[in-house]
Image (cartoon, rainbow, N blue to C red):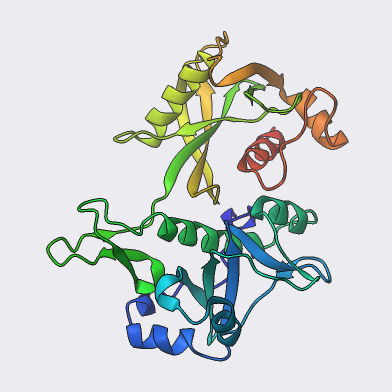
Amino acid sequence: MSDNIIFAGFPLDPADHLRGDDEWLFEKITHAESRFLLYAKGRPLMNISDGLAPAFKTVDDVNRITGGDWAQTDWVFIGNDGEIATFAVALTHKLDLPSHEKFIDLRSIALQVSKDGFVSLPSLLGRGKMLLEWNGRRHFCSCCGHKTKADRGGYVRKCANEKCSAEHFPRTDPVVIMLVTHGDKCLLGRGIGWPEGNYSALAGFMEPGETIEEATRREVFEESGIKVGNVSYIRSQPWPFPSSLMIGVKAEALTTEITIDEKELVDAKWMEKAKLRAIFENGGDEGFRIPPKIAIARHLLEEWLQQD
C-alpha cells in the first residue's frame, strides 16, 4: 500500500550488502553497462525527446564530462537492476547539452510523470538527489574540521584524519503530517506565502526525544490551538526537498476552537467531509485547491474521504 505514493516504491535493489566491497564497486563503476544519472544543483538530467526519461550516461560519457577526476567528483551508488548498476553523479560546472536533454527540477518531474497514476521514477531520482546533496554538504568533518572521504558507495563519509576517523551518515529529517479530525470534519491550514485556496494537512518537524504522538500533539497545538488525543499512524513518504521523511498520521481533536500561530499559518479551518467529497469529485473549487498527487496530504485526505 505504501508503494503507491510518489517518491516511495524504490525500483532497484539497494544492495547494501555489496556497498562495502571496494573491489565490487570499482568493477561496477568502470563497467561499460553501468548507468549514470547526472545532477546539477539537485536537478537530474532528463531526456525530453519523447516525454520524460532519465538521460542515462555511460562511464565513458562521465569521464569525458568530468575529465576523469573521480576524486573531486561527488558520486553515489544507487542500486542494481539485475546485473546493471546505477550511479548518480553531481556536476559542478556548466554542461553543453543537446536539444533533447535538460536538467529539470525534481518536483516538476514528479508532477508530470505521475499525472496518470503512480510511477517509481521519482523515487529513483529522489534517492540520487538526497544522497548527492548530503555528500556535497559533508566534505569536512563536523568533529575536527578535517576533510572527509566517501565510503560504502556514498552512504558513509569518513574523516580522513586518522586521529579522528569519525564516521558520518546521511541525514533524514522526520516530519509529522497529520489529518486532524473531529467527527465528520477535518482541520486544514494555509501556510504563509501559499496561493489563495491552497490548504493542506498541518505538518512540522519532530524534535529530539519526541515520539510521533508527542510531536503531533505539540505541532497541532502550536499552529492551531487545537488539543489532540489519539494519534494513529497511516503511512509515510520520502520527501527529497531536501531530505525528509513525512510521517502521515490521523489525529483526533479534543477541542475545536482555532487560534492560529500567525508565524506559521495565514488561515486554518474545519472542513466538512461531505463538502470535501464534492470538491474532490469536481477537481477543486475557487476556495479550495486539492493538494497535488505527489503530496502525502492528498493521500491522507482521500483515504479519510473513502471511509463511512
Q: Residue shown at 43%/24% (left/top)?
A: 217
Q: Quadrant of residue 57?
A: bottom right
Q: Residue shown at 54%/51% (left/top)?
A: 240
Q: Nearer the viewer, residue 216 or 135?
A: 135
For the N terminus, give its image quadrant: bottom right
For the C terminus, give its image quadrant: top right
Q: Position of residue 290 (x, y in %)?
A: 75, 35
Query: Relative to 101, is 174 on the left or the right?
Result: left
Q: Is residue 243 above or below residue 232?
A: below
Q: Position of residue 24 (x, y in %)?
A: 39, 87
Q: Residue shown at 28%/62% (left/top)?
A: 147
Query: Relative to 133, is 198 on the left or the right?
Result: right
Query: Relative to 147, is 114 on the left or the right?
Result: right
Q: Could one spot residue 13 in this view of the protein?
A: no
Q: Position of residue 34 (x, y in %)?
A: 55, 85
Q: Nearer the viewer, residue 82 or 249?
A: 82
User: Which residue is most to the right?
Assistant: 282
Q: Quadrant of residue 56?
A: bottom right
Q: Is residue 17 above or below residue 212?
A: below
User: Which residue is most to the left?
Assistant: 163
Q: Quadrant of residue 122?
A: bottom right
Q: Could one spot residue 70 in this view of the protein?
A: yes
Q: Nearer the viewer, residue 46 or 20?
A: 46
Tally of marks: 0
Q: Is residue 211 above or below residue 229?
A: below
Q: Residue shown at 49%/22% (left/top)?
A: 220
Q: Position of residue 236 (x, y in %)?
A: 52, 47
Query: Relative to 289, is 200 on the left or the right?
Result: left
